[in-house]
Structures are given as structure tokens and as C-alpha cells.
Image (spheres, rainbow, N blue to C red):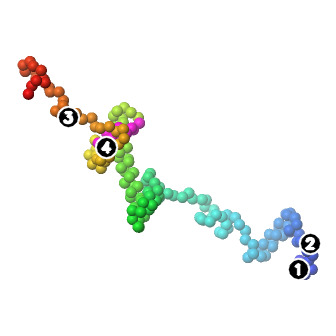
Amino acid sequence: VVPHSQRSTHSLPSSVHHHTKSNKASSANLTNNNKSSITMSGKSGKTGGKGKGKGGRGEKKATTSSVKAGLQFPVGRIGRYLRQGKYATRMGAGAPVYLAAVLEYLCAEILELAGNAARDNKKSRIIPRHITLAVKNDEELNRLLGNVTIAAGGVLPNIHAVLLPKKSATGKKGGSASQDY
């Protein structure tokens, strides 16, 4: 190694000029001698890799709060709506989970009854009419959704007993049924 005062400005060390196998080996020796100045990057080292996780175990996919709660409804989205709606200044961690579970249960109940109504009408698709029939025929859902109007739902088939034609008695005298008072 040439002292710094005797080096010319044009001459550089041989490891800088060419990248051959021998130069790589000599640069590796330099890194072994001076470990504190040069660090190797890669997945094998503890400092290498991409931020989170433990090296070498593969990347874990993020688990949603809906999956953790075992629900189909989006717990995170419902929590965001609760926060943005300013319903309260503070919100517990279980509030969106509970609300998502209640909403999912109600939807499952209505869809099950509406599916039964569709099957009774020999249809494979649920239409608003089937939802109306399901809600109106169930006592609890009818109380919950009593003031709700479902578009294109119609009404329950119902004819008042007074409006039905009277059953004719066999032993009566002639005369029209409308004239009897």
C-alpha cells in the first residue's frame, strides 16, 4: 500500500479499476478486516430485508378484523363510518365488531326468509316482492321494519272477510244474495 503523500492523482487502487475475481476476493478481505465500515445488505442479516417481520420466514398477509371476528361484514369500514359520523367522541374496539355482527345476522335472517319465499313462488332469484313477503310474514321483522317501504315490494295478499261472497245455504228459498238484509 502506497502512503497517501506518494500517490499520484491519476493512479487509483487496482480494486477500483477492474472487477475481476481476484479483485473481488481482495475487496472481500478488506471488508473482513474493516467490518465496522462496510455492512452487507440482504435477507440473511438481521438488519437486511424489508422493515417488518422476522427474516427468512416469508411475508405474512395482513389479517383483517373481519376475519379475526369470523364475520363477512366489513368491521374496519363500519368502524370508519362510526368514527367519521361523530356519534361519540370515543369509541371502543368492540363497537364496530358488535355492530357488524348484528347487521350480518339481520341480513342473513331476511335473506333466508326471502329465499324461502322465492322458492315458494318457484323462482331462483330474490326480488323485492320476496323481501316484502318475508318481512311482513315474520312477527319480529315486521315490528322492526314496520314503517319501512320497500320499493316494488307490493302488499300482503289479504281480502277482508266481509268482502268475501257468502256461502249459499242449500235449504233457503229463492232470491238473490244481494237482496238479503
Of 12 and 36, the residue lying toward us: 12
Q: Are marks 1 and 2 in contact (CB under 8 Å)?
A: no
User: Which label sits in the foreground, 2 or 3?
Assistant: 3
| Residue 121 image position (x, y, % from top left) | 34, 33
**Vertical position of residue 28 compared to residue 58: above or below:** below
How crowded pointer 2 is (Cα within 10 Å; few <14, some 14-19, many 20+) is rated as few
Q: Earlier in the sequence, mark 1 or mark 3?
A: 1
**Vertical position of residue 4 compared to residue 166: above or below:** below
Query: In the image, is residue 102 part of the stretch drawn in magenta?
Result: no
Amino acid at circle 2: His
How crowded pointer 4 is (Cα within 10 Å; few <14, some 14-19, many 20+) is rated as many
Q: Are marks 4 and 2 in contact (CB under 8 Å)?
A: no
Q: Mark 1: which secondary structure?
A: helix
Task: Locate the C terminus and report the quarter of the image it occupies.
Answer: top left
Determine whether, in the image, residue 102 is placed left or right of residue 37: left
User: Residue drawn 37% across and 43% down?
Assistant: 111
Q: Earlier in the sequence, mark 1 or mark 2?
A: 1
Q: Which mark is residue 135?
A: 4
Q: Are marks 4 and 1 in contact (CB under 8 Å)?
A: no
**Vertical position of residue 8 compared to residue 97: above or below:** below
Circle 1 sits on which residue? 4
Prevailing secondary structure of the magenta residues: helix
The Cα–Cα distance between marks 1 and 2, rounded to whole angstroms, is 13 Å
| Residue 43 image position (x, y, % from top left) | 67, 63
- Range drawn in magenta: 125-136
Query: In the image, is residue 132 part of the stretch drawn in magenta?
Result: yes
The Cα–Cα distance between marks 4 and 3, rounded to whole angstroms, is 21 Å
The Cα–Cα distance between marks 4 and 1, rounded to whole angstroms, is 91 Å
Q: Which mark is residue 10?
A: 2
The Cα–Cα distance between marks 4 and 2, rounded to whole angstroms, is 90 Å
